[in-house]
Image: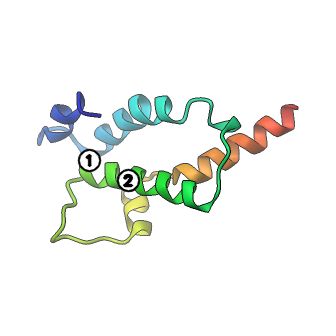
Amino acid sequence: MKTLEELFRDKDLKNHIKINVFNTLVGSVFLYNTKIWTSNKTIDGALDSFHRRMLRKEVKLVYPRKISNIDLYKITKATPWSEIIRERRVKWLGHL
């Protein structure tokens, strides 16, 4: 994420392009092999919190400006990582 910081600071680049880059480069690497992870509410909450923090950085929503998590997901058209992991787990169990 640190190496992409310069890309995300670019004011000429549109938000949807930044989000696509984030999902492609960061999300795919982070979620690799998640179907075999163990999880609980605490872990899912931490994953989603990290994901939202990165999304807020991308769309430049810092402290004085507040937005609900649901609105953030609508603006970025993102899905919480905990839901993605759950879906992958269900698909993986179907193959077993």
Mark 1: few/some/many CA within 10 Å (<14, 14-19, 20+): some
Left or right of 7 in this view: 42: right
Left or right of 23 in this view: 43: right
Mark 2 or 1 closer to N-term? 1
Camera-nearest label, 2 or 1: 1
Task: Give the residue at mark 2.
Answer: 76
The x, y position of residue 45, in whole percent, is 51, 60
- The amino acid at mark 2 is Thr
Which corner quadrant holds the C terminus? Answer: top right
- The amino acid at mark 1 is Glu
**SS of the residue at dot 1?**
helix
* Relative to 56, residue 22 above or below: above
Mark 2: few/some/many CA within 10 Å (<14, 14-19, 20+): some
The x, y position of residue 87, in whole percent, is 69, 46
The x, y position of residue 48, in whole percent, is 48, 55
**SS of the residue at dot 2?**
helix
Q: Are marks 2 and 1 in contact (CB under 8 Å)?
A: yes
The x, y position of residue 93, in whole percent, is 83, 39
Mark 2 → mark 1, Cα distance in angstroms: 9 Å
- Name the mark on residue 58: 1
- Write the residue at 30% across / 37% down: 17
- Write the residue at 56% across / 54% down: 43
Q: Quadrant of residue 89?
A: top right
Q: Quadrant of residue 27?
A: top left
* Relative to 13, residue 49 above or below: below
